[in-house]
Image: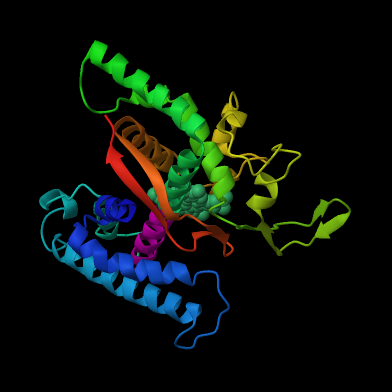
């Protein structure tokens, strides 16, 4: 679901076409952090093959879209004369068809690849974990449901529309705590990379200029000094902590600083909408699976299967 939505909003792909791409991305993700042995049968090999076939599909999509626009010099001003699809690729093509484009074909392909990867693998994992944690913590589910039922009754009293408004989204304070607590425990990015631009003194050690530094978010998010009982799912620990929205030394699920996640706000919105409909319309119970492993990223080794039914 998350992949199809991302593929549609970014590249305008219909589900039938994004299915092919999804398979390649799954192969890519499976071997993303693996021993780099390029031999058939290894995780690394399937990762490289997955990337290759995803890039082939993306190349086709890019070529098709380029053919559908009028290039400068071919008469007329690029995008103005062509059909807009209302997706992110429109903007990329718009830049590529300028007289002096900043984006080359290669950059466009890498951009499409990285955005698809960054948007689906992360949010879908976080949502899966959220569904599991809520099923395992009925009191949290109850409080979350109350927040969303209150939104529904307020809406009925006012305008009766079905869509979530921005004000309603902004009123989802407990939902935001649930999301923060879920991504703290999920540690979807097990490592964040930076480069030391100058010598850095740290606790008696020097990190020389030019060295790569791997920041390890789980070491922060599971530190009992910062988060007492760190393995317990307790969304209220994020009550009254608005500063974590920008990322901090103590909360870096979406990274921090200049290179922090560009999709964080989008992803939180997407998760809030998902949770709104989930808790107001459905109930579910665990069937099997749900075993969490770290490889080193979050994985459900035997999947996570639930039975879901209409509730309201
Ligand atoms: C639960 C959802 C998500 C999580 C946990 C997550 C986490 C992260 C983390 C930890 C980083 C590294 C930040 C750093 O180095 O400081 C990152 C970077 C990035 N994320 Fe996300 N992300 C999520 C969703 C998304 C979505 C939905 C998109 C796109 C629509 C996205 C696009 C990106 C991009 C492009 C970068 C690279 C930013 C840069 O290097 O300047 N992410 N994300």
By secondary structure, the bulk of the magenta-drawn segment is best described as: helix
Rendering coords of residue 113 (x, y %) = 37, 63
Instruction: Please say which color scheme the image uses.
Output: rainbow
Q: Which residues are magenta?
A: 105-121
Compared to residue 93, the image places residue 152 above or below, namely above
For residue 157, side relative to residue 199 (left or right): left
Q: What residue lies at 70% left-to-right and 58% top-to-bottom?
A: 196
Rendering coords of residue 46 (x, y %) = 43, 78
Identify the image quadrant of residue 54.
Answer: bottom left
Compared to residue 52, the image places residue 93 above or below, namely above
Compared to residue 214, the image places residue 51 above or below, namely below
Res 207 seen here:
yes
Identify the image quadrant of residue 27.
Answer: bottom left
Rendering coords of residue 43 (x, y %) = 49, 77
Q: Nearer the viewer, residue 106 or 167?
A: 167
Res 106 seen here:
no
Q: What residue lies at 31% left-to-right and 14% top-to-bottom?
A: 154
Q: Is residue 260 magenta?
A: no
Rendering coords of residue 103 (x, y %) = 35, 61
Q: What residue lies at 44% left-to-right and 88% top-to-bottom?
A: 40
């Amino acid at each position: 679901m998350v992949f199809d939505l991302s593929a549609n909003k970014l590249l305008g792909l219909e589900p039938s076409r994004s299915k092919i791409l999804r398979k390649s991305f799954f192969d890519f993700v499976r071997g993303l952090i693996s021993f780099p042995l390029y031999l058939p049968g290894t995780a690394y090999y399937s990762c490289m093959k997955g990337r290759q076939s995803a890039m082939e599909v993306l190349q086709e999509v890019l070529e098709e879209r380029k053919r559908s626009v009028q290039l400068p010099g071919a008469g007329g001003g690029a995008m103005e004369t062509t059909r807009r699809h209302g997706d992110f690729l429109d903007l990329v093509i718009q830049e590529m068809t300028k007289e002096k484009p900043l984006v080359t074909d290669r950059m466009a392909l890498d951009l499409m690849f990285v955005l698809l990867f960054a948007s689906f693998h992360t949010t879908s994992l976080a949502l899966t974990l959220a569904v599991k944690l809520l099923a395992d913590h009925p009191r949290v589910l109850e409080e979350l449901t109350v927040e969303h039922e209150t939104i529904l009754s307020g809406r009925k009293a006012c305008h009766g529309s079905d869509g979530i408004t921005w004000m309603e989204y902004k009123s989802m304070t407990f939902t935001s705590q649930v999301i923060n607590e879920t991504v703290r425990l999920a540690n979807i990015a097990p490592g964040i990379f930076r480069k030391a631009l100058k010598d850095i003194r740290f606790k008696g050690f020097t990190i020389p200029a030019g060295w790569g530094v791997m920041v390890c978010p789980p070491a922060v998010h599971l530190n009992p000094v910062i988060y007492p009982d760190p393995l317990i799912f307790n969304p209220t620990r994020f009550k009254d902590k608005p500063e974590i929205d920008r990322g901090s030394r103590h909360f870096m699920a979406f990274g921090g600083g200049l290179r922090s996640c560009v999709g964080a706000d989008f992803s939180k919105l997407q998760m809030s909408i998902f949770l709104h409909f989930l808790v107001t319309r459905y109930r579910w119970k665990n069937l099997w699976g749900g075993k969490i492993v770290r490889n080193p990223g979050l994985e459900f080794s035997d999947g996570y299967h639930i039975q879901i039914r209409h509730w309201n």
